[in-house]
Amino acid sequence: MLLFAAGKDRTGILASILLAIAGADKDFIAFNYILSRIGVEAMRTALKNALLATCPPGVTEETPGFKEVCSVKEDYILVLLRKLDEDFGGVEGYCKARLGLTDEELEALKERLKA
């Protein structure tokens, strides 16, 4: 399967993590993510062509997964959040286990995000 494109996923994931830490609910986080569609739609053809130019020979628009890489759907973030809940007990658990944040650092981050 192809990897992420145009930074929308990396940026969307980071923004989603920060929103979750700030206390936003999952529906709001998903809505925020799909707002990326506004920027992506205007550049879809250019992004698609740039991505195709970096793919291995034989990858086309019809290659399974290619259209999804070029899409922005709220389900993408909802699946991520569900997986973080299942594997780490939520975003904060992920931040502690994988990013090495302490409880104190998370609390300081929450305060800054809510300010």
Image (cartoon, helix red, strand yellow):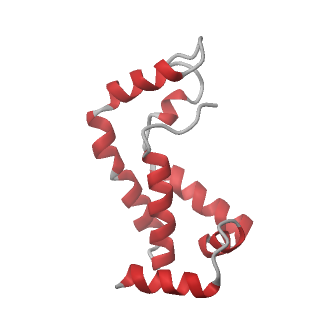
Left or right relative to 20: residue 90: right
Left or right relative to 95: residue 114: left
At a point 50% along the width and 86% down the height, the residue shown is: 108
User: Which residue in the rendered view is the most extreme toward the top?
Assistant: 58
- In the rendered image, the quadrant that contains the N terminus is top right
At a point 48% along the width and 47% down the height, the residue shown is: 9
- Residue 93 appears at what percent x and percent y? 67, 74
- Residue 19 appears at what percent x and percent y? 44, 70
- Residue 101 appears at what percent x and percent y? 63, 76
Nearest the viewer among 113 and 59 is 113
Left or right relative to 18: residue 42: left
Q: Quarter of the image holding residue 32?
A: bottom left
Looking at the image, residue 67 lies above or below residue 105: above
- In the rendered image, the quadrant that contains the C terminus is bottom left
Q: Quarter of the image holding residue 85?
A: bottom right
Looking at the image, residue 83 lies above or below residue 68: below
